[in-house]
Image (cartoon, helix red, strand yellow):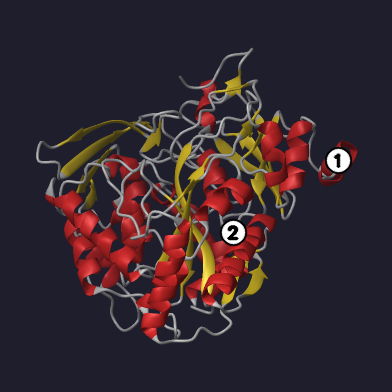
Amino acid sequence: MLPAAACLALLGGCAGGLEGEAELAFTNAGEVASLDPAAITGVPEGKLARFLHEGLVIKHPRTLEPLPGIAESWTIRPDGLVYRFVLRADARWSNGERITAQDFVYSFERLLSPRTAAEYAYQLWYVRGGQRYTSETDAQGNPRHAFETVGIRALSERELEIELEAPTPFFLDILGSVPLMPVHRGTIERMQKLHPDSWRVEWLKPENLVTSGPYVLAQRRIQDRVRLKKNPNYWDRSRIAFETVDVLAVEHLNTMLNLYLTGASVWCDNLPTHALAKLKGRADFQPAPYLGVGFYRFNTTRPPLDDKRVRRALALCIDRAVICEKILAAGESPAWSFVPPAARGHVPVELLHAATAEDNRAAARALLAESGLSLPALEILFATQTINKDVAEVIADGWRRELGFSAKLSNQEARVALDSQKNLRYDVARSSWVGDHPDALGFLEIFRSDSVNNRTGWKHARYDECIDRARRALEPERSALLREAETILMDEAPIAPIWFFVTKNLVSPQLGGFHENALDEHFPQFWHWKDQGGGRR
């Protein structure tokens, strides 16, 4: 571990050019890929986005219940199909312009547009005509249908109406997610004219970015930090407790921990395994169930991984207990299903396995023998991080001992590894999925044949049908369809679920308004020093 003095020196060296120290600082997992809500897919980016942007609703920091955000109120028609929102009269962009219902129409159209190629466009496919607008394109990749066919319209400057394809009980939860936070149309269009080749970068620079949330982007220093300042035009600015916040780009877990222990950071959300035993029981470290799952993807387009018996053998022959107890060591539980047990109203379907680890290994050997295939030296791809390597070593050793083949380990920088997955340039790849909302559909829909988040090459017509029907179905049919979909997923095994997450937040006891929750999402609107008060209640 870095000594405390080295950590402080590192911080001091990074601070050159900034005006004084921020009132509060915390660590984020390395450099963020984007600040554009429509382009954000990762946890570190989402963490920062909640400072800069705000949607129609926000979430209660403990219960995740949807609360008024830019929308001060809403009504839902009795049939559950039409939502009508009234925006706050004092909701303004950071440049002082009023935030209007048309801003949301523009932002939602942009998210849905195939030209944007947003990975999370499907979050608006619950809206009437949303999926068709994204999916049906002409030869140039433009939508075949006018946006007027989509159930989103501004009734007035402050009134927004959204019509759904079918009743969707978690739709308000979706509206609180990062991709559905609005963007400033004027800035984007101005940058497109001034910088036609680089506008996607230019509009997100501190001097250009116009935000809707409690903070503005004051300065960004790559591989160092982001300096945030309180948004003077935010509608609830009087209850934002901190004038300045630094978000530190720190990749190494030991450095994160040392920055926290020396008081240079009030929060880190990941910890080195060697420190967990000493941290357990401390008041500032309270792991809690988290709607996330760690798993391996199989590239089903490559032999012998195109045979489900091989995939099932590999999945069964993973020693999940050792990984959870010896490698992860923060209270994680073995995952034999993909959907976490805490998902709202869902009973997970487990990968069929025997009562003991030895029986699982025997079943794996039998499946491999039944396939008649021999396994080449498969490669396990993972993003560069010690814990990913440790997990891969345990799995590779088990495959060698029980199935008689060698697996090579390949580490890549996180963004490179993700690109390799997207382009199916891998055999087996370490992955994770964290729910955007506490519903099973948010997990299962990513393995539809046409999902950009599938990244396995696996396709199954009945699985797609179950997901599509579940989006429109009412209970109890909806739950039955989701159970059938997960049964197919576990039987076909394009993935091997390994562990269910717990939160790993180390948080200053002096920071009020920060609470553990099932999505591990945290909202600066509620933060304050406990001895000073402030923050939204």
Indicate the position of residue 322 as horizontal and vertical percent values: 57, 52
x and y percent of residue 363 in the render? 40, 68
Residue 316 shows which numbered tag? none
The residue that disc 1 covers is 12
Q: Residue at x 12, y 51 (%)?
A: 477
The residue type indicated by label 2 comes to Ala
Residue at the spot 75% in from the left edge and 50% down from the top edge: 224
Q: Say whether residue 521 is left or right of residue 268.
A: left
Which of the 4 quarters of the picture holds residue 485?
Answer: bottom left
Q: Give the Cα distance between marks 1 and 2.
A: 25 Å
For the residue labelled by badge 1, is the local secondary structure a helix, a strand or a loop?
helix
Where the N terminus falls, by quadrant? top right
Badge 1 crowding class, 10 Å Cα cut-off, few under 14, some 14 to 19, many 20 or more, is: few
> On the rendered image, what quadrant is the C terminus found in?
top left
Quick check: marks 1 and 2 in contact, CB under 8 Å? no
| Residue plotted at (55% across, 44% down) | 47
User: In the image shown, does 248 or 377 lie closer to the viewer?
Assistant: 377
Q: Quadrant of residue 117?
A: bottom left
State the residue in front, 136 or 270.
Answer: 270
Q: Is residue 134 above or below residue 154?
A: below
Tell me the residue that label 2 is attached to.
33
Q: Is residue 314 left or right of residue 391?
A: left
Residue 76, visible in the rendered structure: yes
- SS for tag 2? loop
Of the residues shown, which amino acid type is indicated by label 1? Gly
In this view, the residue in front, 372 or 45, is: 372
